[in-house]
Image (cartoon, rainbow, N blue to C red):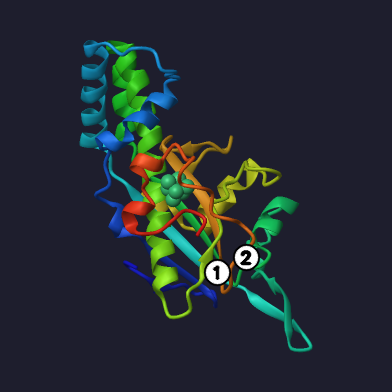
Amino acid sequence: MNNYHQNEDAGKFSWEEKEIDSIRLTMDDRSEILRYVGYSGQPLTDEFESQLQICMEKVNAVAQPRLIATLFQCEPVVVGDVIVEYKWPESLNFLTGEDIHTHLKECREVLLFGATIGASIDRAIRVEEMREPVHALLMDACGSTLIESVCDHFEAILRRRYRDGEEHWHLTTRFSPGYGDLPLEIQNHYADVIEARRIGLTVTPEHIMIPRKSVTAIIGIADHEIGEKHRSCDSCNMNAHCRFRKHGVLCGE
Ligand code: SF4
């Protein structure tokens, strides 16, 4: 992992992930972009295809993917000689609600990350809103697709590292503030904890992330297989262009 350093707090490690800097949209992302604009199978004109291509290129030209992550070690609680649960460090107590506790209950490590494709894409979309609203719509969809792609690639890189490490650890799926009963209101403190400013990611008093095409998410890491089962690739709509399989792993593996 790049720029990996230990923080002052014991059991907390942070790094900026450089391996994702070069991620850009490819034709494999086309179907997801179309899904974001509400495409439902109608014939596409040559003019639309050409606008889509132009917008993908515009987004790729200004995107600056960056990602920062912090890893927390949890303390095993042992009764007899059996680990009954893992105790989070106090600095994670801001993660409230039952759902995140259920999601992470078997995990020895908890990873918080923030990712963004930068502020230039927001500016480029605003310019297009005045000039060419269809382009603005398509670029917005391209930006949403690209930030998800960045997160998928990062998750796949992590899955590969943990799976291929000596201990063959397992990862949960991603869980973001705003999912289930994990409140969106924690977003500001979350950003402070991972030092999101270092990648240019800030949160407004209304808990909105700036730049807009940004994501925060939590992944648990366990030293044994966890309850989540890998879904079937055969019935997955990512089957033909899966970002996980490109890295030699499966989602939810
Ligand atoms: S690994 Fe399989 S199920 Fe998971 S996203 Fe890829 S194609 Fe879909």
- The quadrant where residue 80 appears: bottom right
- What residue does disc 2 label? 91
Q: Which residue is mark 1?
A: 72
The spot of residue 209 in percent (x, y) is: 49, 39
Residue at mark 2: C-beta within 8 A of ligand 1? no
Q: Does 178 appear above or below 224? A: above
Residue 96 lies, in percent from the top left, at: 71, 53
Q: Is residue 241 visible?
A: yes
Left/right of residue 13 with respect to residue 179 in the rendered view: left
Determine if the C-beta at disc 1 is less than 8 A from ligand 1: no
User: Marks 1 and 2: in contact by CB < 8 Å?
Assistant: yes
Residue 2 image label: none
Q: What's under tag 1, amino acid-wise? A: Phe
Give me the residue at 56% from left, 53% from top: 190
Q: Position of residue 124 (x, y in %)?
A: 29, 26
Relative side of 239 to 216, left or right: left
Residue at horizontal 62%, vertical 41%?
178
- Above or below, 45 against 224 in this view is above
Q: Nearer the viewer, residue 219 or 200?
A: 219
Q: Is residue 200 something one can see in this rendering? A: no
The mark nearer the N terminus, 2 or 1, is 1
Secondary element type, mark 2? helix
Q: Whole-Å distance between the Cαs marked 2 and 1? A: 9 Å
Q: Quadrant of residue 133?
A: top left
Judged left or right of residue 75, residue 153 is left
The residue at 31%/46% (across/down) is 65
Q: Which residue type does callout 2 highlight?
A: Ser
Compare residues 2 and 235 and report the one nearer the observer: 235
Q: Give the x, y percent position of residue 223.
A: 56, 74
